[in-house]
Image (cartoon, rainbow, N blue to C red):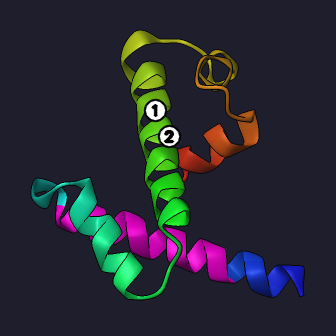
Amino acid sequence: MTKINSSKEEALRIRVYAFFNENRSLGKIFTVRHFIAEKNPRNTVYRILKRSEYLKGSKDLVKHHNISQRQAAKKFDISQQMKEASNNT
């Protein structure tokens, strides 16, 4: 049952990222309102968007400032596994 929930969460995460990137000029609240209208919890949508900011920020650090993934993960207080997963997207 956990696998089903995690795949649903992953699908929502992918949809939120894609929708936000397509509508970035309309702002974060536009994305939040869209997914709230679909009956997704507000906190969940904000958490997903916050995670995407952390992942983007850590990618930029590694790419432009020549620091290790471990250092970037520590700076953004995320696991190195999450950091490595962001490099695959």
Q: Is residue 10 part of the magenta span, yes or no?
A: yes
- In this rendering, which labeled residue sits more in front, label 1 or label 2? 2
Q: Position of residue 59 (x, y in %)?
A: 46, 32
Taking depth in this image into account, of 14 and 59 the one nearest to the observer is: 14
Q: Residue at x 78, y 87 (%)?
A: 4
Question: Does 12 sit left or right of 27 as displayed?
Answer: right
Residue 8 in picture, x, y percent from top left? 65, 83
Q: Amino acid at mark 2?
A: Leu
Residue at image position (69%, 80%) is 7
Whether residue 63 appears in magenta in the rendering, the answer is no
67 shown above or below 7:
above
- Disc 1, SS: helix
Q: Residue at x 44, y 20 (%)?
A: 61
Residue with the mark numbered 2: 55
Circle 1 residue: 59
Q: CA distance from mark 1 to mark 2?
A: 6 Å
Q: Quadrant of residue 29?
A: bottom left
Viewer-closest of 46 and 1: 46
Q: Which residues are magenta?
A: 8-23
Residue 82 sits above or below residue 72 on the image: below
Q: Secondary structure at mark 2?
A: helix
Please tell me whether residue 12 is drawn above or below residue 26 in the rendered image: below
x, y percent for residue 28: 26, 55
